[in-house]
Amino acid sequence: MTDGLTPAWSAGQPIAGWLRLTARGAWLIRDAAVEHPALRAHLNRHYFRDAAGRYCVQNGQQVVYVRLDYAPYALHAAPDGALEAHTGEPAGAVQAACLDEAGALTLLTALGAGRVDEASLGYFADRVCDADGRPADEATLAAFMDGTAQPALFLDLPGGRVPIERCLAADLPSRCGFVRDPDRQYAAPDPG
């Protein structure tokens, strides 16, 4: 029981180290896939970000910190370009786009940072353009990803043109404001 001023989740000791989210948005408990639909739905429904950028699942009075393999969300694009997270939530407007050295596309959306799933990459690849709106060719994209050239590239999306940044996978958490592995930090006090 809480006093009404303290969040209920603060009543229990936080837990870290056993709940993981893959780059494709699959839940793992102690590295075993969560197969039960009701458990997956529970994890998706109670997934949130704390003020320190750590992603968690609220489980009753317990907070369980999530280790992220890549980004906090896996994003899927509908044919009309609407983005949905692995949790089933709409991702909202795209605010920034980051392309890493391996070609993984991460979008910073109203919901948070999400890696675009492989099945949706074609939708975005068809929308990469240069500053004049011409489609970018494969050689330009390859040079952008490996850092040998830094042409101005954009995603031409229904909500507007968004610049694409080159961002190494290791730098993504600091660029997008999240913690990939809270295991060593989970007991640190929340700054907010």
Image (cartoon, grey):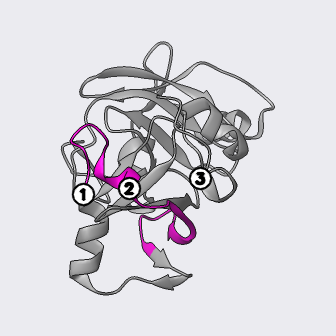
Q: Residue at x 28, y 65 (%)?
A: 60
Question: Can you give x and y, in whole percent of width and height, for residue 166 in the image?
Answer: 65, 32
Amino acid under label 3? Tyr
Mark 1 to mark 2 CA distance (whole Å): 8 Å
Which quadrant of the rendered structure holds the N terminus? Answer: bottom left
Comparing 11 with 58, the one in front is 11
The image position of residue 12, as x and y in percent, is 42, 61
N-term-proximal mark, 1 vs 2: 1
Q: Amino acid at mark 2?
A: Ala
Of marks 2 and 3, the one in the foreground: 2
Give the crowd class for mark 3: few <14, some 14-19, many >=20 residues within 10 Å.
many
Q: Which residue is mark 2?
A: 11
Q: How many circles with numbers are drawn on the protein?
A: 3
In the rendered image, which residue does mark 3 sit on?
A: 186
| Residue drawn at point x = 48 percent, y = 79 percent | 29
CB atoms of marks 1 and 2 within 8 Å = yes
The residue under the point 41% across, 44% down is 49
Res 173 quadrant in image: top right
Read off the magenta span.
1-27
Q: Is residue 191 magenta?
A: no
- Amino acid at the residue labelled 1: Met
Gap in Å between the C-alphas at discs 2 and 3?
15 Å
Of callouts 2 and 3, which one flags the residue occurring earlier in the amino acid sequence? Answer: 2
Q: Nearer the viewer, residue 192 or 123?
A: 192
Q: Is residue 86 visible?
A: yes
